[in-house]
Image (tube, rainbow, N blue to C red):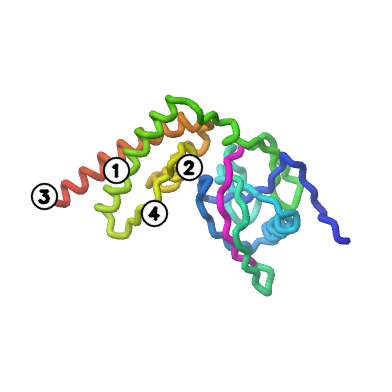
């Protein structure tokens, strides 16, 4: 019986550093061609395990190992399409955020000891309910205004009914820089994340409304 050359502990996670910020609930297609990441995907398939997507802090996606940011997202494999030469097209979906505690660079691919963040959130309080309600209203306005401004904009088919899902959908949909998205991803508690998103949404809504008014004059 073949055994895996690498066996990871429960709090260890293989990582793929990329120039992207993925929130839980989002989907990310990837073309896997580097040998190290082929091995990573094979490991996850054999062990029915997940891996982490994390934004690059320093370095490049291809070649030498890049330095990752401290917070990323655990992803599950949704689909794997293999090519005869070993390359793969995979589809992943974000499940939960994690914080890197320690990085191991001596393995074929990057592995980190991590702790999960979203399980730390307490979503059972009245203040969060009020924040959620306000955020949802401003976010719906953002989607409506964006749809009026851009012909190609397609609002989501559903607006989430829970604080966590709403916060992560907003993070995915905001038209802001990767650095700004990473800052949002690193806000550990959902109430503080929603508060920050309210600030961003209000500013973006003002900008969009101004552009719409200017266009219609």
Residue 157 numbered tag: 4
Q: For numbered disc 3, what is the local secondary structure?
A: loop
N-terminal of the two: label 1 or label 2? 1
Mark 1 in CB contact with mark 2 (< 8 angstroms): no
Q: Indicate the quadrant containing the N terminus: top left, top right, bottom left or bottom right.
A: bottom right
Q: Is the stretch drawn in magenta largely helix, strand or loop?
A: strand
Examine the rendered structure and indicate whether residue 51 appears above or below residue 87.
above
Q: Residues within 10 Å of mark 2 (few under 14, many from 20)?
A: some
Q: For numbered disc 2, what is the local secondary structure?
A: helix
Mark 3 in CB contact with mark 1 (< 8 angstroms): no
The residue at the point 28 percent across, 41 percent down is: 205
The residue at the point 67 percent across, 37 percent down is: 114
Residue 108 lies within the magenta run: no
Mark 2 in CB contact with mark 3 (< 8 angstroms): no
Residue wearing tag 3:
217
Image location of residue 100, percent across then percent down = 64, 37
Residue wearing tag 1:
141
Examine the rendered structure and indicate whether residue 203 appears above or below residue 26.
above
* Mark-to-mark CA distance, 2 and 3: 38 Å
* Mark-to-mark CA distance, 3 and 1: 21 Å
**Nearest-to-viewer mark from 1 and 4:** 4
Q: As drawn, which residue projects farthest toward the right?
A: 1
Image location of residue 52, percent across then percent down = 62, 47
Region rendered in magenta:
88-98
Q: Residues within 10 Å of mark 3 (few under 14, many from 20)?
A: few
N-terminal of the two: label 3 or label 1? 1
N-terminal of the two: label 2 or label 3? 2
Residue wearing tag 2:
165
């Amino acid at each position: 019986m073949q055994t895996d050359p690498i066996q990871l502990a429960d709090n260890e996670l293989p990582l793929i550093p990329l120039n992207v910020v993925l929130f839980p609930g989002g989907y990310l297609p990837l073309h896997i061609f580097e040998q190290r990441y082929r091995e990573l995907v094979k490991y996850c398939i054999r062990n029915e395990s997940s891996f982490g997507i994390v934004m690059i802090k320093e370095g490049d996606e291809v070649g030498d190992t890049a330095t990752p940011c401290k917070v990323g997202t655990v992803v599950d494999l949704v689909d794997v399409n293999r090519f005869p030469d070993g390359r793969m097209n995979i589809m992943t979906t974000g499940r939960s955020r994690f914080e890197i505690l320690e990085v191991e660079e001596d393995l074929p691919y990057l592995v980190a000891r991590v702790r999960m963040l979203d399980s730390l959130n307490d979503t059972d309080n009245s203040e969060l309910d009020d924040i959620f309600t306000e955020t949802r209203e401003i976010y719906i306005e953002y989607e409506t205004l964006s749809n009026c401004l851009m012909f190609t904009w397609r609002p989501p088919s559903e607006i989430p009914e829970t604080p966590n899902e709403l916060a992560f959908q907003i993070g995915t949909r905001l038209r802001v820089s990767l650095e700004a998205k990473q800052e949002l991803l690193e806000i550990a508690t959902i109430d503080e994340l929603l508060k920050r998103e309210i600030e961003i949404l209000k500013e973006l809504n003002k900008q969009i409304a101004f552009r719409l008014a200017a266009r219609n004059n």
